[in-house]
Image: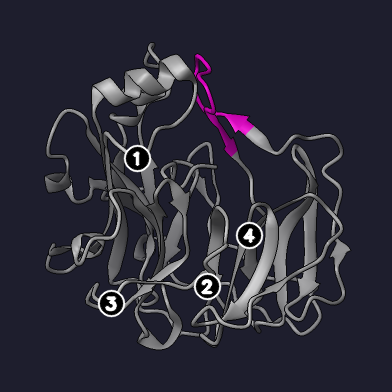
Amino acid sequence: MSNRLFSAIVSVATVCCSATVRCSATVDSGTVVDSAPENVEGATEVRSQEPRASWRIGYTEGRNDVPGGQFVNWITQRACMVRGDGSDRRVLAEELIASPWSWTQFAGWSPDGSQAIIGSLYETPENAAWEREHKTFRMTEGWLADTCLLDLSSGKIVNLSAVERVSIYNTGLFFLPNGNGFGFTPLINGVSKPFQMNADGTDKRDVSTAESGFTYGYSASPDGRRISYHENYQVYVANIDGTGKQRIDTGNSFNFAPTWSPDGQWLLFVSGEHYSCHPSIVRSDGTGFRRLADRGGYRGVVERLREPDFHSESSDVPV
C-alpha cells in the first residue's frame, strides 16, 4: 500500500473519555462498531459506554469511478470527519486544496484527539500522465506531498514537513511517545527513509543506517525507547535513535508493516510470500516467531478502482 493512499484508514478519537478506555471502529455499510478485547488473557472489558455522538471519526472520502486512471480519482479525495452517530460531517482543512490537482487525506489523530493528521498532496497532470504511460510511480519530480497538523478547536494548520524541508514527498507521520516529537517517512532520492523531528518540525534526522534500503511500516514502541519498520520486506528493530539495529529473522521473504503490542513486548505483521502472507507475531527480541492465522488463499489486496489501473490495489495489514 502506498503511503499516499489513506482511503482505507479510519481512525477514532474518544472525547471526554478516561485514558484507560480504548475504542476502535469499523465501517461497513455505514455502521460504526465499537470493540474491545474479549477472552484474551490479561485483558479487561474496555468497551466505552459513551454515546457514539461524542466520538469523532476521521476518514478520506473520494470517488473510485472516474474513468481515466488513479490520478483523476485521487484529486477527488478529501479529509473528512463525522461524529460516531453519523452526524455533523465536515470536510477538514479545505484551504489545503490549492489547485485542481490537489487533494487531502485523513491520516490519523494526536494521542489526545485534539489534532488531526492531514496529508496534503499535489501532482502535476504531466507527471501523472507519464506514470500511467510507464506504469510506475515517479516521485522524484512533479509531486508535493506534505503532512500537516490541524487543531480542531482553532482550525490552525501547521505544515510540519515544510519546516527545514528534506523532501518533496513526506508521509507516514506519527506522534512519538512522551511528547518527544514525530516520526515520518520522507522519500530521499526516491527511497523511503525513517526520520524523526522535533515537535516544531525542526532537526529532521535520518534514523536508518547508511546502507539501508526502502523502509515502510515505521513506528515507535509504546515506551518510546525503540522503533520498528520493514526494510526491503525484512523486519528490523532499533533503539529510538536508530542505533542497535537488529533484523528479525522469520525465514520468509516477505514481511510487511510491523506494529507494536500495547506492552511493547511483541510485534504483529504479515509474513510469508508476496500475496501469500499471514498474520504473525514475534517477541521484540526476535524470539518466539509464530503464525497466528492462515488467510486461506486470500491475496490480501483489494482493488479500489472501478476501472483498474497500475498498482491500484490496496494492501491489508493486521491491526
In the picture as drawn, the residue positioned furthest to the top comes out as 67
Residue 230, labelled with which disc?
4
In the rendered structure, the answer to whether residue 28 lies left or right of residue 189 reads right
Q: Amino acid at mark 1?
A: Thr
* Nearer mark to the viewer, of 4 and 1: 1
Residue 203, labelled with which disc?
3
In the rendered image, residue 194, in percent from the top left (x then y), is placed at 47, 65
Kindly check if marks 2 and 4 are in contact, taking CB atoms under 8 A apart as contact. Answer: no
* Real-space Cα separation, disc 1 to disc 2, in angstroms: 45 Å
- In what element is the residue under mark 1? loop
Based on the picture, tell me whether residue 105 belongs to the magenta stretch: no
At horizontal 64% and vertical 76% (from top left) the residue drawn is 245
- Residue that badge 1 annotates: 140
Mark 3 vs mark 1: which is more N-terminal? 1
Q: Which residue occupies the foreground of this view, 212 or 288?
A: 212
Q: Is residue 174 visible?
A: no
- Residue that badge 2 annotates: 48
- In what element is the residue under mark 3? loop
At horizontal 71% and vertical 65% (from top left) the residue drawn is 268
Quadrant of the rendered image containing residue 62: top left
Mark 2 vs mark 4: which is more N-terminal? 2
Kindly check if marks 1 and 2 are in contact, taking CB atoms under 8 A apart as contact. Answer: no
> Magenta residues, as a range?
302-314
In the rendered image, residue 193, in percent from the top left (x then y), is placed at 47, 60
In the rendered structure, the answer to whether residue 271 lies left or right of residue 32 reads right
* Depicted 270 relative to depicted 295: above or below: below
* Nearer mark to the viewer, of 2 and 4: 4
In the rendered image, residue 267, in percent from the top left (x then y), is placed at 70, 70
Kindly check if marks 4 and 1 are in contact, taking CB atoms under 8 A apart as contact. Answer: no
Mark 2 vs mark 3: which is more N-terminal? 2
At horizontal 47% and vertical 50% (from top left) the residue drawn is 191
